[in-house]
Amino acid sequence: MEELLSTFVRSIFVDNMIFAYYLGMCSYLAVSKNVKTALGLGVAVTFILVCTLPINYLLENYVLKEGALSWLGAGFADVDLSFLSLIIFIAIIASFTQLVEMVVERFAPALYASLGIFLPLIAVNCAILGGSLFMQQKAFAHAGVATVYGLGSGIGWLLAIVGMAAVREKLAYSDIPKPLKGLGITFIITGLMGISFMCFSGLKI
Amino acid sequence: MGLLSSKSKEILLGPLSKNNPVIVQMLGICSALAVTSKLEPSIVMGISVTAVVAFANVIISLLRNTIPNRIRIIVQLVVVAALVTIVSEVLKAFAYDVNKQLSVFVGLIITNCILMGRLEAFALGNGPWAAFLDGIGNGVGYAVILVIIGFFRELLGSGTLLGLRVVPQAFYDFGYVNNGLIILPPMALIVVAVIIWVHRSRNKTLQEN
């Protein structure tokens, strides 16, 4: 229980996907122009992370890792398929995104229309693949921790993009040097937000 | 250059400055920021991405008339993932230390937006030779930005370049201190912002209103 809680809090504040690893920056910069779409994308990313991380965790531990196939019999004990992990992970993510897209289109057409192009683009959001790769690197104890890690990373990403969108809505009224307008000032603000998130890095749970 | 027609030249050199993938098209920013706290991983990352973009562009361009439109994203991802797996195994074999520093970011080349962006925007509509040049151009444009960021962050943050000490000992004796903040993630964003600032004040057409 304690491990779940600390993984959750750490993945939101300390190992924040955007401020600590800059994952998912492309859609973060492109979609953070107003709060409503930012929120929608954030929820979708969180959802996909929560779904794909446990699946990839199980694949990693029962199929891909060295010796992971030993449940098939002694002959498989030293099979190492880890070189396939990139392809498998991205295939799971891409097919899951496709699945979610179809489900949302069928059952919630209004949400589907408001997310538009960003739904299929989640497949190439680095935050999602990054989540799986960090999961592989951190070697979590069981699939529950991986799920909680996915949830926390997703919420952290959502917090960052919604915060950024809120700041950018106000930026329209400020006087910024011309060459910095748009992209430049967005980077600077993200940097400043990152510095303020650094105060969590001493957090011990 | 008699070898290249003027159009090919434009495809190859355009991405270096006025159509740069990182600071103009905003593609591939994640890795541009994350691996640049030192110069060496920046160079390795730049070379890896250039190789992957160039070959993925060629392969997709050759396949472009046979891929059904509906599943093209998955086909592209598989081609890219296979190339990245090769790059990652090569790095593990020949540059193990750098590979350790790059950690997950080698794998993340797959979701690097430069790849998907160039495949979608260029390789699907052009022949293999043009696609190859476009890949090289964009890869080098990306690498240039990485090297600039890596140069400043390593110089100001650690006082070294490629691991060799550049700032003389006498400076430290006078009380010069390395700026530890610049190695931390948030400062990379601000370095990029400064590069964009300089670039846009020189190319007025790129300024936003």
Image (cartoon, coloured by chain):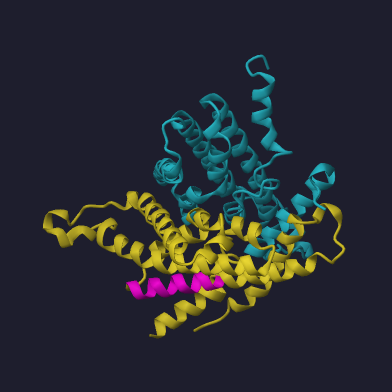
Chain colours: A yellow, B cyan
Instruction: Examine the image and state in which quarter residue B84 appears.
Output: top left
Residue B184 in sight here: no
Q: Left or right: where does residue B105 sit relative to residue B18?
A: left
- Label count reads 0
Say which of B88 and A58 sits in front: A58
Q: Which residues are magenta?
A: A143-156
Query: Residue at (70%, 52%) from the top-left corner?
Result: B152
**Could you tell me what secondary structure mostly forms the magenta stretch?**
helix
Question: In the rendered image of this protein, does residue A192 appear above or below residue B142?
Answer: below
Residue A112, given in percent of the width and then of the height, sits at: 52, 62
Q: Residue furthest top?
A: B2
Q: Left or right: where does residue B4 sit relative to residue A140?
A: right
Classify the position of the N terminus of chain A by image quarter.
bottom left
Say which of A56 and B38 sits in front: A56
Asked if the magenta segment contains residue A20, the reply would be no
Question: In the rendered image of this protein, does residue A16 appear above or below residue A75?
Answer: below
Question: In the rendered image of this protein, does residue B135 appear above or below residue A67?
Answer: above
Residue B66, given in percent of the width and then of the height, sits at: 41, 31
Instruction: Examine the image and state in which quarter residue A136 appears.
Output: bottom left
Residue B28 in sight here: yes
Say which of B149 and B72 sits in front: B72
Query: Residue at (54%, 66%) from the top-left corner?
Result: A111
Residue A193, given in percent of the width and then of the height, sits at: 68, 70
Instruction: Examine the image and state in which quarter residue B171 appears.
Output: bottom right
Q: Left or right: where does residue B200 sit relative to residue B56?
A: right
Residue A29, given in percent of the width and then of the height, sits at: 65, 58
Asked if the magenta segment contains residue A153, the reply would be yes
Q: Residue furthest left?
A: A74
